[in-house]
Image (cartoon, grey):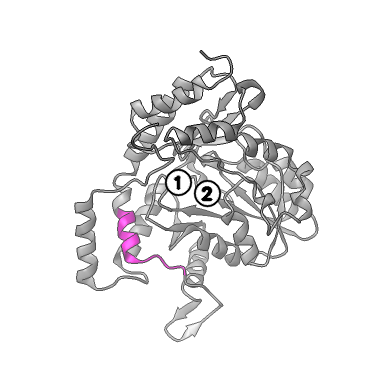
Amino acid sequence: MRDTPIYVTRPSLPPLGEFITYLETIWEEKWITNNGSFHQLFEKELAQYLGVEYISVFSNGTLALITALRALNITGEVITTPFSFVATTHSLWWNGITPVFADIEPGYMNIDPKKIEEAITSKTTAIMGVHVYGNPCDVEAIQKVADKHNLKVIYDAAHAFGVKKNGESILNFGDLSVLSFHATKTFNTIEGGAIVCHSAEMKHHIDNLKNFGFRNEITVEEPGINAKMNEVQAAYGVLQLKYVDGYIAERKRVTESYRTKLEGTAGIKFLYDMDEVTHAYSYFPICVDPEVYGMQRDEIYELMKLDGVKTRRYFYPLISHFNPYCDLPSAAKELLPVAEKVSEQILCLPIYPELTEDEITYITNLIITNAKGSK
């Protein structure tokens, strides 16, 4: 076992000295929350970096998801994926919306547009897709289904910071896209999130909702929530934008090294870059086929943990297995065969900019030497 564990992820941290300088500015201004100067600067520079016109930053991604649904006045049923982090579906529950699970496609593990259409009922009002591991959903096919049935489209883009398709930000698809800036993400503000929208009117609406519904000092337009990003988070985000391209480049290096070293390993499959897509390299998932590899995913997970390598079965269990949702008709295992299989085989390997080539070799050797037939 290694003396020093290798963690599944580590947050990318900007230079401490620069961050302290930003903190000193906040202290001098004595404005630490509620649309201060760093908040305004962060939204402006973030929109420019991402290639979007309107963005509203939040204290975390879950509150951004909850607010996005409220902003569109979504009710009834929403079709979504069981293969995601549970916050995706929790945001529906908090809005009194019934989630309806649709199966995923096996290639990139995103929600299958054909299964979406099969799940539509008279109560369906929206589709919530997830760009899993930053690989874009089939946004054109999903929009075609939405237009045909007059449905709204919201994307959980927690993994899709900076992702572009044919040069266009993936965040510009759908009615709203929601980002997460949690510490484990490619880009982080310690905690944080954002909603991308397509009009000044919708941004105004979202900004009101995240600040209790206030229009001015004495007027509350609607029942909002407190989801504002504070100045410390915003300053951290402004600083991170200076370094995020480097973080992404290093994550690409790690990804390419994994692919080179694991290529041809029996029973191990991994994802290649999508054509015409600029990636953020949020995660490096592999699928372990137990019949070919000779070992169950959970067995290699435990062996690697004993060797000091922390991996993550992400996403396992499926959301449809959790107590709040397992009794829904759409949660039946026979309706979600692809998601069920993927969830039993998926394993995300460590990925962060500081991961060394020696550490990558150590990780991949553990996988290769435990494969059936290896010497």
In terms of image quadrants, where is residue 41? Answer: bottom left
Does residue 192 sit above or below 336 in this rendering?
below
Quadrant (top left, top right, bottom left, bottom right) of the N terminus: top left
The magenta stretch spans residue 286? no
Q: At 64% from the left edge and 61% from the top edge, which residue is drawn?
A: 92
Q: Is residue 233 left or right of residue 167?
A: left
Q: Please tell me how many numbered marks the rendered image carries.
A: 2
Question: Which residue is at 49% across, 20% downward?
Answer: 369
What amino acid type should be assigned to the residue bearing mark 2?
Ala
Q: Which of 24/124 is in front?
A: 24
In front here: 62 or 221?
Answer: 62
In x, y percent, where is residue 153? 63, 53
Q: Please tell me whether residue 371 is drawn above or below residue 346 in the rendered image.
A: above
Which residues are the magenta region?
227-238
**303 or 340: nearer the eye?**
303
Q: Which residue corresponds to the image point at 54% horizontal and 19% vertical from the top-left?
A: 265
Q: Secondary structure at mark 1?
A: loop
* Mark 1 crowdedness (10 Å alpha carbons): few <14, some 14-19, many ≥20: many
Q: Which residue is mark 2?
A: 157
Taking depth in this image into account, of 165 and 199 the one nearest to the observer is 165
The reply to whether the C-beta atoms of the residues labelled 2 and 1 are less than 8 Å apart is yes
Q: Is residue 99 visible?
A: yes
User: What residue did someone put label 1 on?
Assistant: 161
Task: Indicate the secondary structure of the residue bearing disc 2.
Answer: loop
